[in-house]
Structures are given as C-alpha cells and as structure tokens.
Image (spheres, grey):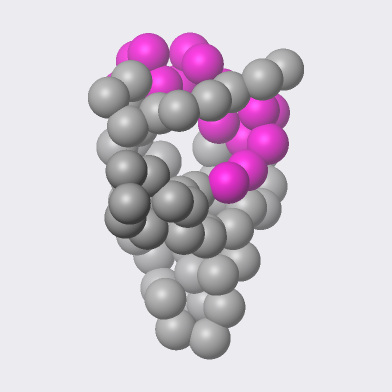
Amino acid sequence: MKNSSIFRINNHGKSTGFFLKVPFKSRLLPALITTNHAINQDDIQNNKIISLYLNNDKMTVKLDNIRKRYTNE
C-alpha cells in the first residue's frame, strides 16, 4: 500500500473501503473493511472476483468463505 489505505471498489456500484492490520493468533493480518452493500454474503459464497483501486493501481481479490470473518446487513 503506497500513500493511503483507502480504496475504491466497483462491485454493486461504486463504494469505498480501507485496509488495516488486525491481530489474529499473535500475528497482524491485513483486513479489508467495507460496507455490506459493497461486498455482501452472496458475493462471498459465490467466490466473486472484485476489483479494488488503491491510488491509481488496480488489484483483483477473490472473495471466499475461508478468509471471510464477518458481514452484517
């Protein structure tokens, strides 16, 4: 992550989110935080591939139930 941890996401329209590191079993792991209308349970269950834009860089992320921790409407 370059200068910012805030990203744009194009999935169900345009949204934003951010990255942070969260403690998990004595390690810090990167976490993607956004709203349920940006990424929802159906996206995760269907292993959807989404595009994130951080600064001017595009990255793709495959969603899955293995790494998902929480979603709430």
How many marks on residues? 0
Quarter of the image for residue 59 reads bottom left
Of 28 and 3, which appears nearest the observer? 28
Q: Residue furthest front?
A: 26
66 w.r.t. 14: above or below: above
Asked if residue 19 is positioned above or below residue 56 in the image, the reply reads above
**Residue 35 colored in magenta in the image:** yes
Quarter in which the C terminus is drawn: top right
- Drawn side of residue 57 relative to residue 27, left or right: right
Q: Position of residue 29 (x, y in %)?
A: 36, 54
State whether residue 45 appears in this view.
yes
First to last magenta residue range: 33-47
Question: Is residue 10 toward the left or the right of residue 62 in the image?
Answer: right
Residue at position x 32%, y 32% in the image:
67
Q: Residue at x 68, y 36 (%)?
A: 35
Q: Position of residue 1 (x, y in %)?
A: 42, 76
Name the spot of residue 21 as percent of width and height, x first: 46, 59
